[in-house]
Amino acid sequence: MTLILGVDIGGTDIKLGLVDGEGEIRGSGKISTRPAEGPEAAAARVRAWLAESAAGAGAIAAAGVDCAGLVDGERGFLHVSPNLVGWKNVPLRDVFERALGVPAIVENDANAAAYGEWARGAGRGMKNFVCLTLGTGVGGGVIVNGELYRGSSGFAGEIGHAVISADGPLCACGNRGCLEALIGARAIVERAIGMLRGAGGSGNAWGDSPTVEALSRAAASGDAVAAAAFRETGRWLGIALANVVHILAPEAIAIGGGVAGAGDLILEPARATVRDCVMDGAMASVRIVPAELGNRASFIGVSLLALGRLNERR
């Protein structure tokens, strides 16, 4: 049985998975990222986890590594990541190949999640598929004719930085009105607080430090302001998805990530906006669905991408 190690590097934790050739998880775990210690130290901790916690599973044949940011998969290079301060222009593939002693690939985390969902989740059996991950930021990945689409620069799929409102709020990337600035977790909370104050509410109805999860629970329990904040969020998402439909005409668009846990509070207004904005023929075959793999999508996807690269070399 061929085993691939999937390494999903976040700002706080590194999620790890041993994935077989069928995309089944044979072991998993989590370790601290500690970005300030640098990529070599993180790779060494991954090696230690593999030796201590996964030794009984068998030897790995390759590794797939993903993280947020501008990742050049062809060169195995991380240019910059919003979650990994100080990790700039890092030859991440070389770092992990030296640490683990096996071939490795690197990929953007949203691309990896999209590939995982296409191969083993909500996009299974489709030729053309898009996946968005909604959380602190907004990531995107695109499958075209059964292949992960990276574009000429290698950075395609940055749907979160499509400008949806030219005069909108400032995004972390420096532009205004990006989808991420409109529907990221912080934007949703700020929208709800603004609506509450506009309605004459005093204080904060959702605690001192409200979260999207708290707002979701409140909306499900009948909180009209929280529900309105999600409807507005869904409307902005729907505008972006209508553009995706017109440009790519995928069979389905899957929505995942922590913010997507709000479910139909966001998805229903998004679907309604898409129906209003796209040409009838373009919408006829496009479904907007929840992602299926949760936080396993990235390490499953990047493992399968690594397996594909390994098989090409044989």
Image (cartoon, grey):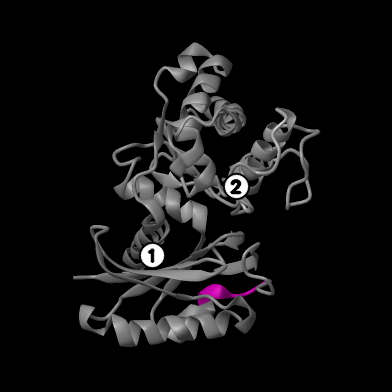
Query: What type of secondary structure mainly makes up the magenta span?
Result: loop
Q: Nearer the viewer, mark 1 or mark 2?
A: 2
Is 41 placed above or below 68 here?
below
Q: Nearer the viewer, residue 76 or 58?
A: 58
Q: Amino acid at mark 2?
A: Ala
In the figure, is residue 77 to the left or right of 3? right
If the image is split into quadrants, where does the C terminus sit? bottom left
Region in magenta: 89-93
For residue 276, which quarter of the picture?
top right
Q: Amino acid at mark 1?
A: Ala
Is 44 placed above or below 190 here?
below
In the figure, is residue 166 to the left or right of 113? right
**Helix, strand or loop at disc 2?**
helix
Query: Can residue 44 be seen?
Result: yes
Is 54 placed above or below 241 here?
below
Q: Which residue is mark 2?
A: 185
Closer to the chain start, of discs 1 and 2, is 2
Q: Which residue is mark 1?
A: 306
For residue 104, which quarter of the picture?
bottom left
Q: Residue at x 37, y 37 (%)?
A: 127
